[in-house]
Amino acid sequence: MKILAFATTAAITLAACSPSNDNTRTDSASTSQPAAASTGTSDAPLTGAGATFPYPIYSKWFSDYAAKTGVKINYQSIGSGGGIRQLSEQTVDFGASDAPMSDDEMASAKGGPVQHIPTVLGAVCITYNLPEVKQTLNITGDLIGDIFLGKVTKWNDPRIAALNKGVPLPNRDIVVVHRSDGSGTSYVFTDYLTTVSAGWKGGPGKGKDVKWPVGLGGKGNEGVTGQVKQTPGAIGYVELAYARQNKLPTAAVRNAAGKFVEPSIDAVTAAAAGVVQKLPPSSDYRISIVNAPGADAYPISSFTWILLYKTQPNAAKGKALLDFLHWALHDGEQLASSLDYAPMPALLVARLDTTLATIRVGATP
Amino acid sequence: MTEFVASDAAEAGVVATTPTPARPSRSWTEIGSEIGDRVYSWSIVGFASLVPILLLTIFVAVGVAAWPALREFGFSFVTSSDWDPVAKHFGAAPAIYGTVVSSFLALVIATPLALGVAIFLSEFAPSWLRQPVAFTVDLLAAVPSVIYGVWGMYVLVPVLRTTVMPFLRDTLHLGVLPLFSGVAYGPSMFAAGLILAIMCLPYISAVTREVLAAVPRSQREAALALGATRWEVIRDAVIPYARSGIIGGIMLGLGRALGETMAVTMLIGNRHEIAASLFAPGYTMASLIANEFSEATGDLHLSALMAVGFVLLLVTFLVNAVARWLVWRTARER
């Protein structure tokens, strides 16, 4: 049903689209400029669809930007997968995703090459319910992997005790709680486990849904949190913003430099900064920053991306989108930490400015 | 069987038609009304056939979308327990099992309760109590399922984990049965069955109440006249008369349980595993679709979810067919 509705939307949008769009699809040699079409759509709002994780800050950006410039942006937070599909079908002007597009997805996008623009940073926190323990627990990636693989089943396991000297660890069963719905949070978490745990890499692997070896599934951050709070001995993972807003206990995770780091906005930005310094100039920004280098980097961190075509056939819309992205990366970024997102390192913003300048507006690919 | 069969005449009376009067010669108004009749009958035929056509298009659309997955995995789609979106292998057996078992569990719990409520309300309750209680029970049907889910997660599940499950398993020693063994996490097939029982109870009880109210007075009076006690009147005269209607109500409740999504997702633990114990987490087809549809990665994953939807449609269809057959059979037996 959804597919039908989706197909209908696609058909209507295509039918309503400018002639220039037809040119791109039939790849004709015609040089007709899209100016005529763009005058017809110049006051039409920009449309986007995708990830739910950055929706709070995106909606704040869109409303602030509309108040400032009058440019309206409609965004549907239907999930990263839906955002990628709609961008591929050209039913939206931009997509948004918590996981970068795969090469296959990039190749099947109907509007040509896609540019990933990282916008803000998020992180995944390990939360737990141990009434006996008042201190912050220390944990390593390898150990998280073995807990979620079902190999470590007791809280007083010697491997946990070795990291937490002096903490009264109870003889409780560990109850693993994971996300039951497909989500970017699961993607980042399993991306991290695949990076640091050989057992996880050879087993479930990384994805928005994976085959969880053990545990209970909760729907959404709130579902995981609910089950962790209700179950003594439970361990789960939730995104940073949610953990901070609900004041959940979170573990300090050992990073690549060997230091135990608690999740915080600064530690997430530090993780991105560590990776960006070594970024090759040719990078398409489809980069993972899990287990990032840097003494203060929080290891389970990630970008979230806005996706747009490198060639924008509609001049007016393309320019409006680029103007918005420029505003978001400079002014919008200042709002990030107040909404519990980590802002991007300044070095990356400077590089993105040059990348945005390469987007071709009002041309056919 | 000691059934009192005073009902045949009453039942026949319902379907008896009045004889049509002889027609005088046709007038213009009559021809006009005949055309009106035709238009009317065509349009109601049209409206009536809209529903089967709609159902058919849903079946076809879901079937077409499900085809790639069904072709890829064949029969193993319904027998395999391996649901692995990363490896792109999909088997929906735990979800099918979970849907059937949680719904069945719900009926086992809800049916006696709902019948009790309905019988009390229609036969025993003083009139000042009847309306408020009936209203409250009906109100259960109006509560949104997400409210049941939240209530289940924060109230029902902790009580189950700390009190009910240990009581059943250890105090009553039911733990020797595989059905009640294992670790009590809380979120489980048992929790899902309980919440579904509460959710389908008002449907069963409302239908049963109406059916019992439709049993003619003469049926009860005949039984009383033969010296039956109140209990015997209900057991031998009223219930058998209403039996096919009651089965219809139970099947309506079952339909509700099979398709319920939100509350079950929040309580069942969402685990792709067929476990003997009711205390173990499970999955249902509806929750699987709800959980994974929006973020399904790749065409095969989407198609597999559509295939789950297709199987769910088939199961619902099958259950309704069986229900029809049961109603038809019990109606014929009398």
Image (tube, grey):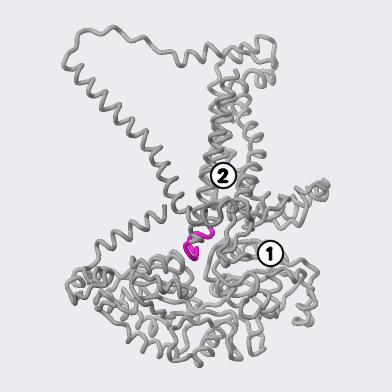
> Residue B119 lies in what quarter of the image?
top right
Chain letter for mark 1:
A
Q: Is residue B223 covered in magenta?
A: no
User: A324 left or right of A215?
Assistant: left
Q: Position of residue A140 (x, y in %)?
A: 68, 80
User: A198 left or right of B298?
Assistant: right
Q: Is residue A136 visible?
A: no
Residue bearing mark 2:
B258
Total numbered circles: 2
Dot 1: within a 10 Å radius of its alpha carbon, few (fewer than 14), some, or many (20 or more) residues? some
Residue at 55 percent of width and 31 percent of height = B248
Q: Position of residue B83 (x, y in %)?
A: 60, 60
Task: Identify whether A270 is placed above or below A104.
Answer: below
User: B124 left or right of A350?
Assistant: right
Q: Amino acid at mark 1?
A: Val
Q: Position of residue A365 (x, y in %)?
A: 29, 78
Residue at 78 percent of width and 49 percent of height = B178
Residues marked 1 and 2 touching at CB (< 8 Å): no
Q: Check residue A214 in the rendering and tell me which mark sits there, or answer none.
A: 1
Q: Amino acid at mark 2?
A: Leu
Task: Identify whether B109 is placed above or below B78.
Answer: above
Q: Position of residue B145 (x, y in %)?
A: 54, 49
The answer to whether tags 1 and 2 share a subunit is: no
> Residue A132 lies in what quarter of the image?
bottom right
Dot 2: within a 10 Å radius of its alpha carbon, few (fewer than 14), some, or many (20 or more) residues? many
Report the magenta residues as a range.
B291-299
